[in-house]
Amino acid sequence: MARARLRLRPPRGRGEQVAAAVVACAVAWGAVRLAVATWHAAVGLWPWLAAAAGTVAAAALVWVGRRLWRARRARRVRAQNLAGLRLTLADIDAMDDTAFEYALRDLLLRDGWMAHRVGGQGDQAADVIGHHPRHGRIVIQAKHTKVAGKVGSPVMYQVKGTATPVHGADIAVVVTNGSFTSDARAWGERHRIHWMDRDRLRSWAENSLPLQEVLRLPVRPARRRAA
């Protein structure tokens, strides 16, 4: 059975119209009194509300300041620790692929680059990406292998195909703790893909020679600001 819908009908006759007007005035008067009472209550509570808001704001500022201070101190301590970073080839040979990628990132940080590790599935031939104010953006492909292992030309082809088009690199480097085939080295030099074999890695990681000096990276000209 359908429920009956309640419908309001307009007042009929003078008596109903007067009664409706009285009710409307009473409702309006009640609303006005409620608004006035709310205003007076807000005025009375305003000093307390302002004090509470100020306390909350001050606490928030203190919390944010402490977080920023701790983050800055952590970065400073990390930079101090990395400043003396030195990895022997024996240390590197004992690493797995992931540890090798993080080690290359830390070596870049030591040399003044901003760097992060991105290696993993779908990395598109970029295990570490960094940036230097004087040398630009760098992409490193890490190839951890046995001492006698050799990196061939296909790795160079892959890095060439993604370093600049995908990652926007100014510099592309393949680093291994092994060696490269002669074809890979020649192809890399011809197509501006830097390579770092075991001997160069020793200079960088073990002898603490900065990457930019090991690879003789050019200094990029400063960009002119638009007038």
Image (spheres, rainbow, N blue to C red):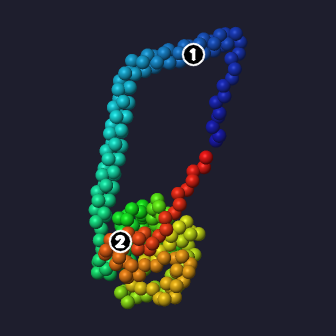
Mark 2 residue crowding within 10 angstroms, few (<14) / some (14–19) / many (20+): some
Element at label 2 = loop
**Could you tell me which residue is drawn at 35 percent across and 24 percent down?**
48
- Which circle marks residue 28 in the picture? 1
Where does the image place residue 130, in percent across and percent down from the top left?
A: 45, 65
- The x, y position of residue 187, in whole percent, is 54, 83
**Which amino acid lies under the numbered mark 2 shown in the image of this protein?**
Leu
Number of marks in the rendered image: 2
Q: Is residue 175 above or below residue 21?
A: below
Q: Image quadrant of residue 202?
A: bottom left
Residue 73: image location, x then y, percent: 30, 52
**Residue on which the image places disc 2:** 209
Q: Are marks 2 and 1 in contact (CB under 8 Å)?
A: no
| Residue 162 position in % (x across, y down) | 56, 73
Q: Earlier in the sequence, mark 2 or mark 1?
A: 1
Pick whichever, 133 or 54, lies toward us. 133
Quarter occupied by residue 89: bottom left
Q: Amino acid at mark 1?
A: Ala
Vertical order, 212 against 4 (above or below)? below
Q: Is residue 44 visible?
A: yes
Of 214 and 18, which appears nearest the observer?
Answer: 214
Q: Identify which residue, 96 or 87, lies in the foreground.
A: 87
Residue name at image x 52 percent, y 85 percent = 186
Q: Which mark is residue 36?
A: none
